[in-house]
Image (cartoon, grey):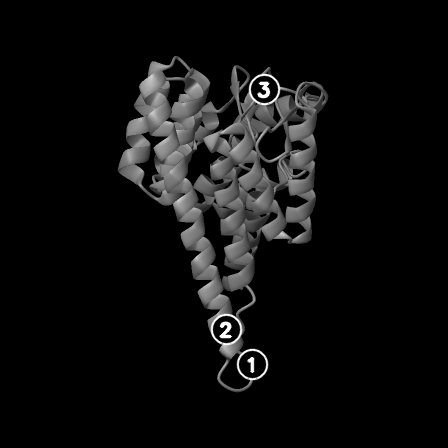
Amino acid sequence: MAGFSDISGAIRLAKASNATLFCGYCGTETMVVGRAGVCSNCEMPIEQDARAFSEKNPELSAVLGTIRVAVRKGDFDTAAKAYDDAFAKYKDPGFLYAESLVRIRHSNATIAQIRYDRKGFMEENTAYRNKGAQLTSSAKLLLAKAISVCNNSLAAGLTPGNAYLLFLCYNKMGKARAAGSTIGLIEKTGSIYLSRYAKMAHDAAVRDYKALMKDAEAMLAKDSFSVNAFFYLALSALKNGDEGRALRIIDGTRQFAANGSMGSLAADVKRFEESLL
């Protein structure tokens, strides 16, 4: 197993980068090394900085700003409606995928309200549980629709974008075999970067944490860098029994790799350590 010092170069590389790129599907700005990357929030490909994107797509940029504010406030219905409108206007299945993530987040927030210290028959818990299930079902329907649109677009021509989005949708739905088969499609488009990233994300989905460690380390090279690889590397360390390394990676990348997933992982590590006391 590689030690923490083996990725210190990648950490220095990330800290030295002053570049960020803007996601045209969720509005997140992500630190990058090079001219392309993957969004740290929704994992969609990113290629333009915020200024260039806004100048080229002023209306969509404003919509994404509205979505980000709504999600931050927990106003998930407003964000979902904005995504519905964006798909209706642009016909881009990426907005269906992005909306599914909002629905999943809404579901998680709803289920988190379930409490077992309530008095009486806990009718509120039943309502929260039912609503959470409905939101999850809505997310799956959005993913299924995105898959259908992607498959139709493949008939017109294979591109890195539609092949990779197909992978993301299958991976999020938990369809491991279908997701794995799309990695080959991504490779056929010649996008080495996206195929490597997809392989890493697929490792995590199928819980192959030995392979995940190797593939995450490969995604921290200068010519194939993704800040998300730090999360996947920390995850692999945790699942392979090296909680100390996982926490060191999280602490070492906190300044530039801070996102919801990394925070949740840090909490998992802390809970594990507390369980040993």
Which residue, given by chain and number where applicable, does mark 1 sit on? 118
User: SS for tag 2?
Assistant: helix
| Residue 275 coordinates in the image, percent (x, y) | 50, 63
| Residue 254 coordinates in the image, percent (x, y) | 65, 39
C-alpha span from label 1 to label 2: 9 Å
User: Circle 2: is it few (<14), some (14-19), or many (20+) Cα within 10 Å?
Assistant: some
Closer to the N terminus: mark 1 or mark 2?
1
Evaluate if marks 3 and 2 touch, with contact meaning CB atoms under 8 Å apart.
no
Q: Nearer the viewer, residue 108 or 252?
A: 108
Evaluate if marks 1 and 2 touch, with contact meaning CB atoms under 8 Å apart.
yes
Q: Nearer the viewer, residue 79 or 39?
A: 79
Which residue, given by chain and number where applicable, does mark 3 sit on? 47
Q: In the rendered image of this protein, does residue 156 appear above or below residue 204?
A: above
C-alpha span from label 3 to label 1: 49 Å
| Residue 154 coordinates in the image, percent (x, y) | 34, 22
| Residue 3 coordinates in the image, percent (x, y) | 49, 32
Residue at (64% x, 33% y) in the render: 27
Q: Residue furthest bottom?
A: 120
Q: Is residue 214 visible?
A: no
Closer to the N terminus: mark 3 or mark 1?
3
Which residue, given by chain and number where applicable, does mark 2 sit on? 125
Q: Residue furthest top?
A: 190
Which amino acid does the dot numbered 3 rest on?
Glu
| Relative side of 243 to 64, left or right | left
Q: In the rendered image of this protein, does residue 213 appear above or below residue 220?
A: below
Q: In the rendered image of this protein, does residue 119 appear above or below residue 251?
A: below
Q: Quadrant of the N terminus?
A: top left
Q: Nearer the viewer, residue 203 or 49?
A: 49
Which amino acid does the dot numbered 2 rest on?
Asn
Q: Quadrant of the C terminus?
A: bottom right
User: SS for tag 3?
Assistant: loop
Residue at (64% x, 53% y) in the render: 75
